[in-house]
Amino acid sequence: MGKHRPDALAPRYLEQFRCIGSACPESCCTGWTVSIDKASYQQYRQVKIEPLATLVRESVQRIPDGTGRNYARIRLGQDSSCPLLDEQKLCRIHSELGEKALSRTCSNYPRIYGIDDDRHIASATLSCPESARLALTEHTALDPITLLLPFANAQLVPLSYKRMKPADDQGDPVLVHAKLIAHAVDGLVRLPTLNAAQSLVQAGLMLRRLARIEARGQAGTLELARTIEHYLAPQHLANVPTLMNNLPVQRTAQLSMLFETTQRYLSKHGGRPSFVALINDVQAGLKLEQGLESAVANLDAALHQRWSPLEAQHPQLLKNYLLNDLTKSLFPRQDILGIEREFMDLALRFALIKFYLLGLAALRGPDFGIDDVVRVVYVVVRNIEHNNSFMTAVMDDLAARDALRLDVLATLVL
Ligand code: SF4
């Protein structure tokens, strides 16, 4: 590597991440369209070792008009797995040609890179079971570190997200102070006095106020600073846990919104087998066939008897999920008009994960534990990331019920 190798702000767990290969419960090489970049495609065409050469010729196909990172793709086998895996489910490219021969997609996954102004940000998608395990199980996994990146220079870092420095004449207070807002939300999620759902609701309340700032320029900045100061003031935060604990949560509305939305999506579009299996477990745990009233009682019992004790012991579980999602998406990137919807997208992913967790907890009873949380997170994140239509359909469905508002947030997540 050259002396210009860039570094990035990254969560601690990324430093420890290693693919666990054949021990992986749901390999990324299954059911996923893998894009192959032009340089890798050309290198693979030169392979002479058999049977790899034939396998590559048969399964790596040019994309008509494909360029750059999307030059070709791997055609999956009938069982939806990558045909380049050997009997032990290990990648033949990796084992026979070496790590350097992996395509960009394969060597980068699950890592995601972004740039915030001029600072590189690295994180990982939790659709990988191993990155989910590392990120969720350790209390300090989301602590920031500086990580040297595996690229010879900054131009080679594949960027998924960008948040550029606002222009000097930018008047939108949210765009001008995006970093400050990100910092404030991060601080709320890390607060030890709030659980993950409570911190999300508190952040949502603050963002709802920020989204209503009418002034622009200096006056807007002043109002934004005052709002953040108010929501982060120790005397204000001291009352939040009591207020949240006393908030009436309409569990029937929560259940019907989140479960019916999921079912509607599945019946129209289907889902990955692991996601369908999870939803079947949720349905069995809540015993929905016995009616809404008993399902709500089961949901409540799962919350108080299974999830809350586990979360009290391991408060980082869903907090780290949230912190990772905030970092990975470089929240906020939208202007004052878009910040509510941008946040609701993130909050809805959290709401679905927590809801499925409760359904699974109802099924697993006293056996419910950390491994179940890791399973729910990677299965849901994978389903969302592999089906572009999933979040759009779910968001549209809730918007049609007028539920896509920050004031409905508490009902969805608490
Ligand atoms: S999902 Fe993660 S652990 Fe599993 S094979 Fe892919 S990179 Fe490795």
Image: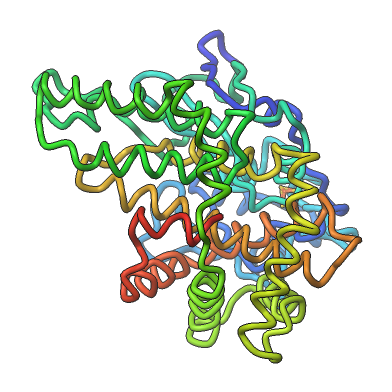
Is residue 108 something that shows in the picture?
A: no
Using residue 160 as the reference point, say whether residue 404 is left or right of it. left
Q: Quadrant of the N terminus?
A: top right
Colour pattern: rainbow
Quarter of the image holding residue 32?
Answer: bottom right
Residue nearest the viewer, comparing 109 with 45 = 109
Q: Position of residue 191 (x, y in %)?
A: 58, 28
Quarter of the image holding residue 15?
Answer: top right
Quarter of the image holding residue 315?
Answer: top right
Residue nearest the viewer, comparing 171 with 62 = 171
Q: Residue at x 35, y 71 (%)?
A: 396
Q: Quadrant of the C terminus?
A: bottom right
Q: Position of residue 386 (x, y in %)?
A: 54, 63
Number of labelled discs? 0
Q: Residue at x 62, y 27 (%)?
A: 11
Please, is residue 293 above or below residue 323 in the view? below
Q: Position of residue 178 (x, y in %)?
A: 31, 29
Using residue 97 as the reference point, say whether residue 119 is left or right of it. left
Using residue 189 as the reference point, say whether residue 79 is left or right of it. right
Residue nearest the viewer, comparing 196 with 21 = 196
Q: Position of residue 18 (x, y in %)?
A: 77, 37
Please, is residue 196 above or below residue 410 in the view? above
Residue nearest the viewer, comparing 69 with 113 = 113
Q: Residue at x 49, y 63 (%)?
A: 62
Is residue 153 something that shows in the picture?
A: yes
Q: Residue at x 80, y 58 (%)?
A: 306
